[in-house]
Image: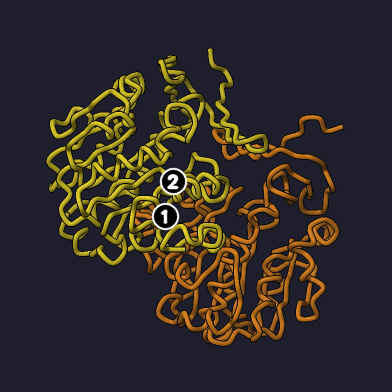
Chain colours: A orange, B yellow
Amino acid sequence: MYSDLWIEERFEDFLGLRLKVEKVLFSGKSEFQTVDVVETKGHGKMLLNDGLIMVTERDEFAYHDMITHVPMFVHPNPKNVLIIGGGDGGTAREVIRHSSVEKCVMVEIDGMVVDACKEHIPQTASALNNPKVELIIGDGVKYVKESDIKFDVILVDSTDPIGPAAPLFGSEFYGDVFNCLTDNGIVVSQGESSWYAMDIQKSLLNVLNEQFQNTYLYSFSNLTYPGGLWSFTFASKSLDPLKDFAMSRVEKSGLEFDYYNKELHTACFSLPNFARKGLKGLIQNA
Amino acid sequence: MYSDLWIEERFEDFLGLRLKVEKVLFSGKSEFQTVDVVETKGHGKMLLNDGLIMVTERDEFAYHDMITHVPMFVHPNPKNVLIIGGGDGGTAREVIRHSSVEKCVMVEIDGMVVDACKEHIPQTASALNNPKVELIIGDGVKYVKESDIKFDVILVDSTDPIGPAAPLFGSEFYGDVFNCLTDNGIVVSQGESSWYAMDIQKSLLNVLNEQFQNTYLYSFSNLTYPGGLWSFTFASKSLDPLKDFAMSRVEKSGLEFDYYNKELHTACFSLPNFARKGLKGLIQNA
């Protein structure tokens, strides 16, 4: 019935990214957002929240490698990891590959995202059945406010700062994140694109700088997000993502990746000048 | 009259990138291709050849910085530079910023591209009036076959390997390029995207390896090309882009850039693992 079905993601009023859809696998409306899973041509299965592309099977490894392995190889011994968001499961999948990890708590606000991915995108969601993963369907903002567990690494795997993810870009949330981190804890957050969304980057970095001694931004390539050159923020109480990183840790882990590698760990902090200039004073690598 | 005008660039049959157009400034059909210049919303003026996006004012600096300054800061004293293609003028603009350059020959097959850019996109084309630039409207393939000038750096600033640019990806052309280079000459070529066009990358690298001792691929972010993570190939008779590079050269030049910087010079050769795996044996940085 879908003779020529395309999904278009609009960015502001001047850009559209269109992807060919073979079949709609799931469409629902949760308390928080619309949730769709489609089979695309060329990009495998794809998750959309409120019509925005979250994950495709073709390139999800780039995002999930880079949100996870950069902080996990800076921290000398990450045992307890908290993921806020990350409903597709890809981040949890990468976290539990690290043998030091004893517990990975994941707090996703929207159970419909998790259920849809478990049913239709096992490539990312299968890790959610691992006994090391404690999945909580609930509000991450409330969780970090009330939790008395201290985490070594917190990964804020959120959507854009609209809808349910808006509080995840605010001061109050990061004050609570700070309190949930161990003394050498690290928080890495979805950091938008310097090409199109530097205003959001600046706002997030200002919030992080209220709490954290070290603040960096690092980049990676995302096929299906507007701007392509996407980023994560890295903030920590004491650990430096470059000086406290050793390539030997990656080698000793025995892990192999499709995107991350030990040279790229350092290289991804070398930003183009337009990003450096725009973020000067807000990050240590500008 | 253009109440809701958009341009869509299709990639294969599963991807489309749409950009909002405010006004069509020029549309022509040359002996080689269609040539359009449009005023976009959000990306400034944009050049399209055969409907494919070549350059936008918003992000052209990324491409032009990276095709030019990587080889120009590896070569110790580039005096004579040859550009094949590059009709918009942006590459020539960056080449002549280097004080060592005495002559920049640019051989562009399509005079209509040059004329359209001179009239409508002075941001890139104004450099073409500089006395150090010798602009030849002609066939670059023929030029390198017949020229007896030796160049220090050759930049192949071409479109995709279809239409007039197809021979620029072939063995015969690169045999002639080799002969047109000095003993420590470097050739850098538009290298497509590892995400979507690794087959073209492999083919080009195989051709380069027939001639050159050193072959590398380096990456940068292009906003408006499908795949985002775009690349250039670096091939040379003797110079190594990493070992023969010194940050001090960039510092001494006094030049400032919007994309390139001395740390990024090295970082851009650190490729993600999927690119390394796919190009293993073809480049020295895989």
The reply to whether the C-beta atoms of the residues labelled 1 and 2 are less than 8 Å apart is yes
| A205 displayed left or right of A279 | right
From the top left corner, tell me how far across and down residue A232 is, in percent.
Answer: 53, 63
Residue in front for this viewpoint, A132 or A208: A132
Residue neighbourhood size for the residue with mark 2, other residues' Cα within 10 Å, grouped as few (<14), some (14–19), many (≥20): many
Above or below residue A240? Residue A218 is: above
What's under tag 2, amino acid-wise? Answer: Gly
Name the residue located 43 percent from the left edge and 39 percent from the top edge: B169
Name the residue located 43 percent from the left edge and 51 percent from the top edge: B220
From the top left corner, tell me how far across and down residue A148 is, in percent.
Answer: 69, 84
Which residue is disc 2 drawn over?
B191
Above or below residue A12? Residue B249 is: below
From the top left corner, tell me how far across and down residue B226 is, in percent.
Answer: 54, 41
- CA–CA distance in space, label 1 to label 2: 8 Å
Q: Circle 2 — which element?
A: strand
Quarter residue A89 falls in: bottom right
Name the residue located 82 percent from the left edge and 54 percent from the top edge: A31
Q: Is residue A6 visible?
A: yes
